[in-house]
Image (cartoon, rainbow, N blue to C red):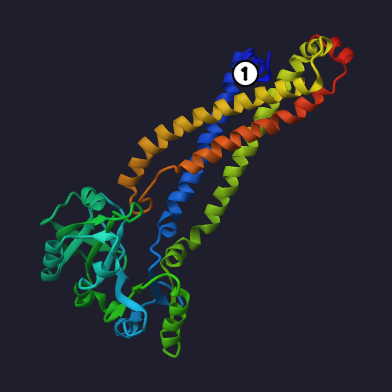
Amino acid sequence: MNLATYARRNLFRRRGRTILTIIAVTVAVLIFCAIRTFIVAWNAGADEAAADRIATRHKVSITMQLPRHYIDELREVPGIQAATWANWFGAKDPKERVPFFAGLAVDHNTWFDVQQDMKVSADVLAAWKQTPNGAILGDVLARALEVQVGSRLVITSDIYPGDWEFKVVGIYTPVRKTVDRNTLLFRWDYLNNDPRAVYSKEHLGWMVSRIAGSADSAALSRRIDAKFESRDDQTMTMSERAFALSFLGGFSAVLSAFQWVSLGILVIMTLILANTIAMSVRERTHEYGVLRAIGFPPGHIFGFIVGESLLVSLAGGLVGAVIVELLINHALGPFMQDNMAGVFQHFFTPGWVVAVAVGAAAVLGVVAGLIPAVLASRLKVTDALRRLD
């Protein structure tokens, strides 16, 4: 008899208890992976941001705008290969098929030169330049709004009053999996020429620049900000990743809380395992005494108990991993990407998260069995044999 065989044969001696413990570990692994998936998906846009792009906004706040002529001066800075701009529109669907989505007024001449992870055909781009109220949508948003190329689209805004009518001229194709497929792009001059947008007249929300490489992005950012330092409207330039993270600033405390919750789930799992193993050891004390009496050393008793704890936790971890793959990656993930693409462009549990969860279950299974195993291995044979319960 070896350690693995003994642990395996003892695994279901208390079938109901073992099954419930495995279920508890499975649920813990599932919750841990779900929380980590949420965090990874929320940060995905920032984590996979382009290294060769930087963003420039108002120094005080992203909600404050910059004069239109800033873009021309930005393009004169050495190291800037191309630059474009956008204004936040705060788009809403009046029919409430999609309560809220990203609507951006952008420069139709330069947007796709800089934002190269959004692709459109030359024909679509030409049609956009010839259509003042032309709009280009992501495929997920187009399905939600029930429109296609050539459709008339009416939306409202949280910022600009009234209904705004557009003609859908194209659907952009995302190059990266984290590109938002739930965005509406329309021409900045259409917004700028409308009297309802007097607040934004000849102003930009932020500017995006494509640079030669990421090595000099910090120095280039400082040069850009120094250029506008003496102006009434000063700027703050940062990497695209930092710019994306700035939108998450208000949610950082919640994400941090989720991190701690996921760790707390593992602690609870360890306590459940420890309780189960302690009960098993208490019931088998007489049995361990017999094993000691016939020649099994304390190390074997220790190994039997830790091995059983490891098998229970590993079984729960592997079952949890299978459920994560089926439930999150093949069911919940596609649903989130289709229905909440504006927030979660790519909702998928990475392999490393599953590996960490299963590995943590195995390690914590060993930890949970340590104290009962140590206590059992140190029992005197005579004391162990006296216990018949």
In what quadrant of the picture does the C terminus appear? top right
In what quadrant of the picture does the N terminus appear? top right
Q: Residues within 10 Å of mark 1 (few under 14, many from 20)?
A: some
Q: Which quadrant would residue 128 be assigned to in this image?
A: bottom left
Residue 296 or residue 204, whichever sits in front:
296
Tell me the amino acid under the disc marked 1: Arg
Q: Residue at x 58, y 22 (%)?
A: 20
Q: Is residue 332 visible?
A: yes
x, y percentage for residue 184? 25, 60
15 in relation to 257, above or below: above
x, y percentage for residue 133? 15, 67
Q: Residue at x 46, y 66 (%)?
A: 242
Residue 368 in the figure: left or right of residue 102 = right
Residue 289 or residue 60, whichever sits in front:
289
x, y percentage for residue 36? 50, 45
Query: At numbered mark 1, what does the secondary structure look like: helix, strand or loop?
Result: helix
- In the displayed image of the protein, which residue is found farthest to the bottom? 230
18 in relation to 227, above or below: above
53 in relation to 357, above or below: below
Residue at numbered disc 1? 17
